[in-house]
Amino acid sequence: VSIAEKFGAHVQHHQNDTEIISFTPWPKYSRTTYINVDVSNKEGILHARDLGLVPSEKANIIITPLPEFALGTLFDESHKGRFLMLVRHPIERLVSLFYYLQVATWEKTYRPSWKNATLLQWSKSHSKIWKNFLVKKIIGKDDFTEDEFLEMMDTVRKYFVVGLMDEMEESVKRFNAVMKLNVNNNTAFEECMVEFFGNTDGSSEKKNSNEHPKVLEGSPEWDVLAELNSYDMRLYELILELFDTQKDIIYSYRSV
């Protein structure tokens, strides 16, 4: 697998390269190759376009937090792509964030002061910073209009293959099918799945997971977060719809 993401431009000081290069930083430990571009910001995406990242066909996967900008900048009618997006329910993500950052001393965003607040108090104050997080990421800016939101929804319908955190195993299978990866009887793949997501029987823990109380739909906490994140909730409804309708289309790739 050859990946274009932030790491590739910085690991061996490739920021000022004038042509697309693929390299394997640690051949003894991994066969993964990286491309010498940083597509984590608009400047880097523009630089990748100027170097001809997509036409070079050297990257199998491009990882970026700015999908809509990347779509309009890197791809064209002659060089098309497909987005893979793994999504968690917006409210579950925020509740997890509230509890996780109370204890995650290793994170830059560690917030020990949140231990002194209830989830409802936090929902009414601090959570506003993260409201409609997913929609903002896809659109690429914090302030957007209803028309821009609807345009983004249309982009997701046309170009995104979606997965759900609640359906992790099925989602990974679909992503593999889209990328035409054969992982049947692949020990390394199975070990990776267990390491990051745990055994399907629940006998091992997920990597970087944090157990916390659940929030019930219809509770005051849920209602506050749902109102603040109304755009993310609307997008999630579309993602649920796409997850249901994409299954047969995706698995048909295996017969192509």
Image (cartoon, rainbow, N blue to C red):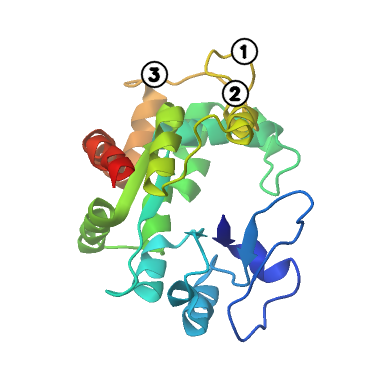
- Which element carries disc 3, helix, strand or loop? loop
CA–CA distance in space, label 3 to label 2: 25 Å
Point out the tag, 3 or 1, that comes first from the N-terminus: 1
> Where on the picture, by quarter, is residue 24?
bottom right
- Which element carries disc 2, helix, strand or loop? loop
The percent position of residue 39, horizontal first and vertical second, equals 53, 68
Tag 3: Cα neighbours inside 10 Å, few (<14), some, or many (≥20)?
Answer: few
Q: What residue sits right under mark 1 in the picture?
A: 203
CA–CA distance in space, label 3 to label 1: 26 Å
The percent position of residue 80, horizontal first and vertical second, equals 33, 67
Point out the tag, 3 or 2, that comes first from the N-terminus: 2
- Which element carries disc 1, helix, strand or loop? loop
Residue 160 vs 25, above or below: the answer is above
Q: Amino acid at mark 2?
A: Gly
Q: Amino acid at mark 1?
A: Ser
Q: Is residue 241 visible?
A: no
Residue 38 vs 130, above or below: the answer is below
Q: What residue sits right under mark 3 in the picture?
A: 216
Q: What residue sits right under mark 2 in the picture?
A: 198
> Where on the picture, by quarter, is residue 34?
bottom right
Residue appearing at x 48%, y 80% in the figure: 52
Circles 1, 2 touching at the beta carbon (< 8 Å): yes
